[in-house]
Image (tube, coloured by chain):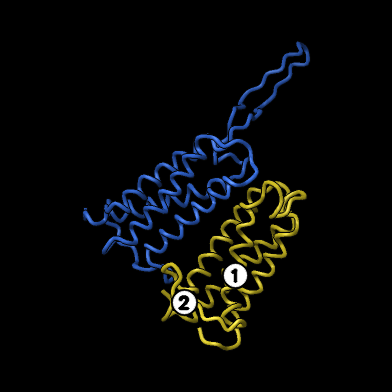
Chain colours: A blue, B yellow
Amino acid sequence: MNNLKLSPGNIVILVAGAVILVASFLPFYDVPTIGDIDVDFETGEVEVSGGGDSVNAWNPDWGFPVTTLPAVLGAAMAVVVGLTAFANVRLPERVMGFSWNQIHLLAGAQTAIMMLAFLIADSPDKGIGFWLMLLASIGLVVGAVLREREPAAA
Amino acid sequence: MDNKQPSPGEWAMMGGAVVALLGSFLDISGDVSAWGRGAFPIVTLIPLYCVVAGVLVAVQRFGNVSLPDRLAGFGAGQLSLALGFFATLMSLCWLIAADDTGAGLFLLLVGSAAVLVGAVLVARQQAPTVG
């Protein structure tokens, strides 16, 4: 493993990518949801099951796959860093004219812009998953900027 | 980029920007536009990206404005390509996410795809200088 490949920028991207992926499974919005409702008409009993107090970024009724996109982008950034650092995968130097540093910058910026847009948007109360995703998205931008400034970064 | 008539790719980018901007004022889901409550600014990012890409081309072609070779480390062609790509990606995601899809969302998708295709055409045309 080349030490240069695990530079501070790459470490920040790895950690932030892992955090944003894990956080996407935590509550994104704090909203009560109703699951299945079973009504027994003979006894009059109502049984509610499968509901909850929150929805995560993967909930199909609450914005999936838009809410998931920042997590996917962040995870993809971490995977690229992980593959080059740990699996010695050799990626092409440029993709569609973009260097990997530029791709990380663009993906990180897109992730942060989307999370900031979710922050501003008129939406239900945000959950812990949202806030962690927002922090991680900022981490991805910081990591990408650090990576850009590092000499001979992979 | 020298000063001459816009190429087909550049026309596609400018046209796509206009289509996306128009689409942003139509209903994307239910009776909400991209500027409406709940959609702003998440959905609004799509027309904004397209308009920025279109304006980057238009000011160079019609405004006699010469942009710096690189903006924040990116060429103007690269920025347009990235804006078109992310606008198209977000449009597709919204198409999947929206329950009641309106005409505005389809126009956003068509406009952003046009910006992306146009940016790819321009990038291929300028292949030796892109990057």
From the viewer's perspective, tell me whether residue A146 is left or right of residue A108.
left
Which residue is drawn at the image coordinates 67% and 50% (left, top)? B39
From the viewer's perspective, tell me whether residue A10 is left or right of residue B42.
left
Q: Residues within 10 Å of mark 1 (few under 14, many from 20)?
A: many
Q: Of marks 1 and 2, which one's residue comes earlier in the chain?
A: 2
Residue A11 at what x, y percent from top left? 31, 49
Mark 1 vs mark 2, CA separation in Å: 21 Å
Residue B13 at what x, y percent from top left? 61, 73
The subunit carrying tag 2 is B
Quadrant where the C terminus of chain A sits is bottom left
Furthest residue in direction bottom, as rendered: B4
Residue A142 at what x, y percent from top left? 39, 53
Q: Nearer the viewer, mark 1 or mark 2?
A: 2
Which residue is drawn at the image coordinates 62% and 46% (left, top)? A121
B108 to A130, vertically: above or below = below
Depth check, front residue: B79 or A61? B79
Residue B89 at what x, y percent from top left? 56, 58
Q: Which residue is mark 2?
A: B68
Q: Which secondary structure lies at badge 1? A: helix
From the viewer's perspective, tell me whether residue A25 is left or right of residue B41.
left
Q: Which mark is residue B115?
A: 1
Q: Which secondary structure lies at badge 2? A: loop
